[in-house]
Amino acid sequence: MSTNVASLTAPVTLTEGAVKEIKKLISQQELGEDYGLRLGVEGGGCAGMNYILGFDQQKEGDQEYLIDGIKVFMHKAHGLYLVGMQVDFQDGLNARGFTFSNPNASSTCGCGTSFSV
């Protein structure tokens, strides 16, 4: 099912903080080689669409990317909403967790995990 991963340019970027946290989570979980990080969107949330971020296996319609040694799966249709997005990990006093900076979002909600286009 995999496409030639080397020839695909990932539509999203991961900051150094995000890469470090994702690799830490991968090392803590006992995931098989066929698992990767899933990035995507789904309907819902207070602004209309929620981000999807989690570990999963490749599914029909997915494209596979390799970002800083991390296998990333994204459904082809989700690229329209996510192209140019940057995923970061904050570990400060005011916030802890993954954040999404999406140039395609016309508005976002206060929690930062929901957006509209």
Image: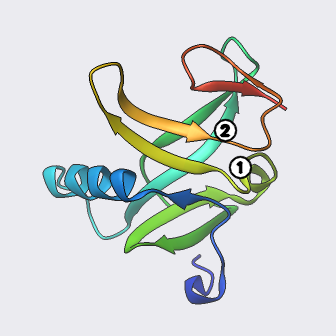
Q: Nearer the viewer, residue 103 or 39?
A: 103
| Res. 1 image quadrant | bottom right
Give the side of residue 58 with respect to residue 18, left or right.
right
**Which residue position is annotated with label 2?**
41
Q: Are marks 1 and 2 in contact (CB under 8 Å)?
A: yes
Give the side of residue 11 with respect to residue 20, left or right.
right
| Res. 54 image quadrant | top left
Residue 82 tag number: 1
Q: Position of residue 59 (x, y in %)?
A: 58, 58
Q: Earlier in the sequence, mark 1 or mark 2?
A: 2
The residue that appears at 70% across and 61% down in the rendered structure is 61
The residue that appears at 74% across and 60% down in the rendered structure is 76
Q: Position of residue 107 (x, y in %)?
A: 78, 24
Q: Secondary structure at mark 1?
A: helix
The residue that appears at 66% across and 38% down in the rendered structure is 41
* Kind of residue at badge 1: Leu
Residue 79 lies, with reference to residue 7, above or below; the image says above
Marks 1/2: CA–CA distance: 8 Å
